[in-house]
Amino acid sequence: MKKIILADSAGFCFGVTRATQMAFQAAEENCPICSLGPIIHSPQVVEKLEKKGVKVVQKVGDIEAGTVIIRSHGITAGELADIHARNLTAVDATCPFVKKAQDYAAKLCAEGYAVVLVGEKDHPEVQGIISYARRAKVAVVANSEEALRLPIQFKIGIVAQTTQSIETLRQVTDVCLNKSKEVRVFNTICDATSVRQDEAREISKQADLMLVVGGFNSANTTRLAQICRELQPRTYHVELAGQIESEWFAGVKNVGITAGASTPRWIIDEVVERVGSLEN
């Protein structure tokens, strides 16, 4: 019998729970209704919402009328202005932690700091945060190597994508301390991210194989897989239980399972059931 070690924090975080509850409630009360981008990075949840009539659109200009749900990752300041200009009804499901990062970026800009954002430049959350640092060019860096290429500045202000690792934020901050006499840092990494990453490290040390469950388009899930893989090379990122292959488990006694912050509980339960059904 295989031993399954399931992370206590696996699955929806506060922000995702809040966003999905708002989205499903809005779907019951409004028509027509859409979401600007996927509400969360879970294709399965997005599909369930589509069956409720929530169409995913990529541009505000594609929305003719009705209600628009603002995704948990947030949107840009320009998109929000366009929503209001078109007299659309907005259901703002932006994660409060993301909003805080947006506010800090705006604050740093207003106070004359050169803003450095630790994150993935193409991620929608990052694009949104950038837009709130009005009249300033934000430098987005993914790691300390990229930070080394930043120019010397009089004063630097740092914020982070909410799903970044604290280690990366520390490393970038250390580099910036050598590039400026004044560095101000707002740790905008949400607690749920830190807890999940710490649990993933601990479980990876105990497991013969790690499963990381969540959308392939989920940044925080992908990062969990990277963290696990550093400690346990036999790490697999799966989106659904049906993607698990029995051959992976040859000689495995202890199976660690964790999941991203946008992974529904029913998918996690199916993965646990699938692993439990495999013979040693």
Image: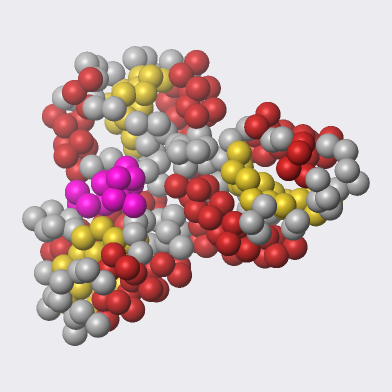
Q: Residue at x 13, y 29 (%)?
A: 85
Residue 27 seen in the current view: yes
Would residue 222 appear left or right of 62 to someone viewing this image?
right
Where residue 7 sits, quadrant-wise, is bottom right
Residue 50 point in image, percent of width and height: 46, 19
Would residue 125 appear left or right of 163 to someone viewing this image?
left
Would residue 77 appear left or right of 221 to someone viewing this image?
left
Where residue 106 sits, quadrant-wise, is bottom left
Q: Residue at x 76, y 51 (%)?
A: 255
Magenta segment: does it hold 39?
no
- The type of colouring in the image is secondary structure
Q: Is residue 173 above or below residue 134?
A: below
The residue lying toward the viewer, choosing from 139 and 24, is 139
Residue 258 seen in the current view: no
Name the outermost residue toward the right.
1
Where residue 81 sits, quadrant-wise, is top left
Residue 51 point in image, percent of width and height: 50, 15
Question: How many discs appear?
Answer: 0
Q: Residue at x 31, y 24 (%)?
A: 57
The residue lying toward the viewer, choosing from 98 and 246, is 246
Magenta segment: does it hold 131?
yes
Q: Residue at x 34, y 69 (%)?
A: 144
Instruction: Give the residues in magenta.
Output: 120-132
Q: Quadrant of the C terminus?
A: top right
Would residue 143 appear left or right of 133 to someone viewing this image?
right
Q: Is residue 274 above or below residue 145?
A: above
Q: Is residue 141 above or below residue 75?
A: below
Q: State whether the magenta stretch is mostly helix, strand or loop.
A: helix
Residue 228 point in image, percent of width and height: 60, 57
The residue lying toward the viewer, choosing from 254 and 31, is 254
